[in-house]
Amino acid sequence: MKKDLISLADLSLADIEKILALAAKLKRRNQPKLLRDKALGLIFKKSSTRTRVSFEVAIRQLGGYSTFLRTEDVQIGRGESIADTAKVLSRYLNGIVIRTFDHNEIVEFAKNASIPVINGLTDLSHPCQVLCDLFTILERKKRLQGLKVAYIGDGSNNMAHSWIYAAIKAGIELTIATPKKYPPSAAVQKAVRAFTSQKGRFTVTVDPQAAALGADVLYTDVWVSMGQEKERDEKIRAFRPYQVNAQLVALAKRDCMVMHCLPAHRGEEITADVIDGKHSVVFDQAENRLHVQKAILALLMG
Ligand code: CP
Ligand code: NVA
């Protein structure tokens, strides 16, 4: 495995399987103190409930501790360079999770840090979430290869991008239903074409019903991601036909799983009856962030 976890594009299928297997083990049995006295830093430029709390609890349960740094409180918020910050924090910490807007900031940080750098979400991708999603699917379906996942909503956001990488690597048939104006990033599509192994595939359609038909998993995310607040009215209008509701669920397999990375907006991307209904696994999915991130921390910082 590489030093950092910045994008699923950098992970081999063997790396992914190793993370998922260790997560299963850590979920099953008592916590061995794999990271005794190790320090994990978290630099967050955006809000977070799940990522922040699950990483903080994960490192503690593994015997280490965390220090949470809001960008406003550290010198990086006043213009200290990313390179200098990365070099200094590498002298104190054993690993760092970063949540920010511009993906290049994490890449730059990692280049200058001697410690593992973990992407806790950027505008471009959200790898830790999708690793947790794969784990949650595997728990229930006992396989990933050959499954049909329909991602309904914003095809241009971080979740869609990480899902594309995951699907190609793990042998999943991913269909992204999104309006024409919101396709996945051209850079992500290009990166995928260069993967040496193409076990899965992804297609993009404007038709949510076609995507949902026969799906094993219906996945959705917010229509307005953090940082896009100004585009809210336009996006709400564009995505209205892309709601995961009972009609859409009826098109999927009878035992389909409904997933959402959360936070959710009931009545927008998903209806209350569906997210709180029998197909929904969203709270198990949220719990699994803790187990999967323990595995990530143990493998990168151990
Ligand atoms: N799913 C997720 O990353 O949630 P938070 O924004 O609360 O961390
Ligand atoms: N696409 C969402 C994911 C939140 C976990 C956002 O970036 O706001």
Image (spheres, helix red, strand yellow):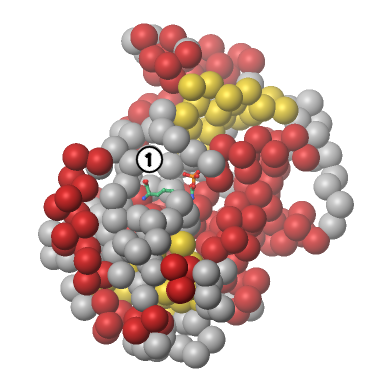
How many numbered marks appear?
1
SS of the residue under disc 1: loop
In this image, 135 relative to 244: left or right? Answer: right
From the viewer's perspective, tell me whether residue 221 is left or right of residue 31. left
Where is residue 171? Give x, y as percent: 46, 74
Please give the name of the residue rendered at 46% of the width and 88% of the height, measured from the top-left corner.
253
Image coordinates for residue 82, horizontal then vertical, percent: 39, 18
Which one is in front, 295 or 132?
Answer: 132
- Residue at the location (70% across, 41% down)? 58
Q: Quadrant of residue 301?
A: top right
Label 1 beta carbon less than 8 Å to ligand 2 = no
Q: Is residue 14 above or below residue 232?
A: below
Q: Is residue 82 above or below residue 242?
A: above
**Image location of residue 36, percent across then percent down:** 81, 31
Say if residue 9 shows up in the picture.
yes
Is residue 14 in sight in this rendering?
no
Q: How far across and down, in percent of the image, does residue 116 sit?
A: 57, 32
Q: Residue at x 40, y 61 (%)?
A: 266
Look at the image and tell me in which quarter the C terminus lies: top right
**Residue highlighted by disc 1:** 122
Of residue 1 and residue 251, the one placed in the foreground of this image is: 251
Q: Quadrant of residue 244?
A: bottom left
Please indicate whether residue 248 sits to the left or right of residue 147 in the image.
left
Residue for point 25% across, 42% down: 228
Q: Amino acid at mark 1?
A: Thr
Q: Is residue 9 above or below residue 213?
A: above
